[in-house]
Image: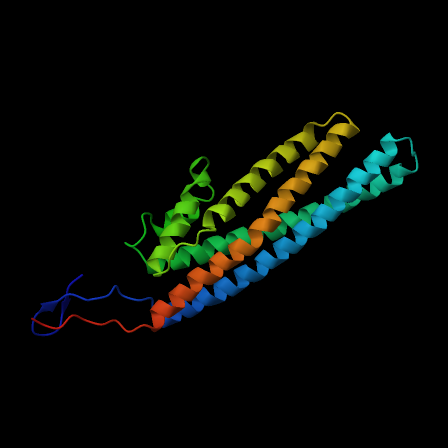
């Protein structure tokens, strides 16, 4: 974009930087998102413990220990209550992440391949949510002037695999006809939560790194090219 300096049209040497007030708001959103990512990681650890308890209870019952039925009842109660809490935690984290990503993308319109709206929509539209969010995050790394980290693909694969296994686990739980199938569903749930737990610190670093880039750009002066 060219600018009128009162005498002639001149071209900025650098791209406009985010406004300081917007950068501060993004930083606050980032902190809240990072806190929720930590909480989600903790819920994954607890869920793994509950599922392990359930597998042990089922194994004992199948092995002839009738008293293990009380353990299975306890597992049912724990998994029901904590399953709701875990889902709410993950939902809150996802919503806040999308708000943060939207606000960041809005600062760099024209520097990313998709609009801020698509930075949100790509997470929830079927099929494209398998790769659009990955591309969008890569665009944001570049937009803030940072090199995309090599571990971004690891983070994304962990996230996609976690969701895939979790979906299969839920389907198996709903359609299970015997205790052995429930055990398999519990085992798949442990795998899904382990993958999610591994992805959490990389997601945390993603939010931190991109936000730091936004803050650095907001504090950098915009140098105009000298008039010719």
Residue 65 horizontal side relative to residue 72, left or right: right
Coloration of the structure image: rainbow
146 up-or-down from 150: above or below? below
Question: Which image quadrant for residue 68?
Answer: top right
In this view of the protein, which residue sits in the foreground, 102 or 211? 211
Q: Nearer the viewer, residue 94 or 12?
A: 12
Name the residue: 88% across, 31% down: 63
Q: Indicate the quadrant containing the N terminus: top left, top right, bottom left or bottom right.
A: bottom left
In the figure, is residue 59 to the left or right of 40?
Answer: right
Residue 59 rendering spot, x and y as whole percentages? 83, 34
Q: Residue at x 39, y 49 (%)?
A: 136
Which quarter of the rendering shows the C terminus? Answer: bottom left
Q: Nearer the viewer, residue 74 or 151?
A: 151
Query: How far from the left and from the top, in percent, is residue 33?
Result: 53, 59
With 149 as the anchor, is 69 left or right in this view? Answer: right
Q: Position of residue 7 (x, y in %)?
A: 7, 74
Q: Given the current orientation, which residue lies at the most extreme front position?
A: 150
Where residue 40 sits: x, y (%)?
62, 54
Residue closest to the eye, 201 or 96:
201
Question: Which residue is located at x 27 percent, y 65 percent?
Answer: 16
């Amino acid at each position: 974009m060219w600018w009128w300096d009162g005498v002639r049209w001149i071209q900025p040497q650098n791209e406009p930087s985010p406004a300081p007030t917007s950068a501060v708001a993004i930083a606050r959103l980032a902190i809240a998102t990072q806190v929720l990512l930590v909480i989600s990681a903790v819920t994954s650890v607890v869920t793994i413990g509950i599922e392990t308890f359930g597998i042990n209870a089922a194994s004992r019952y199948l092995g002839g220990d009738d008293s293990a039925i009380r353990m299975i009842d306890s597992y049912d109660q724990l998994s029901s209550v904590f399953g709701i809490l875990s889902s709410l935690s993950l939902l809150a984290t996802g919503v806040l992440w999308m708000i943060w990503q939207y606000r960041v993308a809005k600062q760099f319109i024209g520097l990313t391949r998709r609009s801020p709206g698509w930075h949100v929509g790509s997470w929830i539209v079927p099929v494209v949510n398998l790769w659009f969010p990955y591309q969008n995050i890569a665009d944001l790394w570049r937009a803030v002037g940072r090199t995309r980290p090599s571990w971004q693909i690891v983070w994304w694969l962990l996230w996609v695999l976690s969701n895939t296994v979790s979906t299969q686990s839920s389907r198996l739980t709903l359609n299970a006809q015997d205790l052995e199938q429930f055990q398999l569903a519990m085992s798949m749930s442990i795998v899904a939560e382990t993958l999610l737990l591994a992805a959490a610190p990389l997601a945390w670093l993603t939010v931190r790194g991109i936000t730091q880039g936004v803050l650095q750009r907001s504090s950098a002066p915009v140098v105009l090219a000298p008039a010719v």
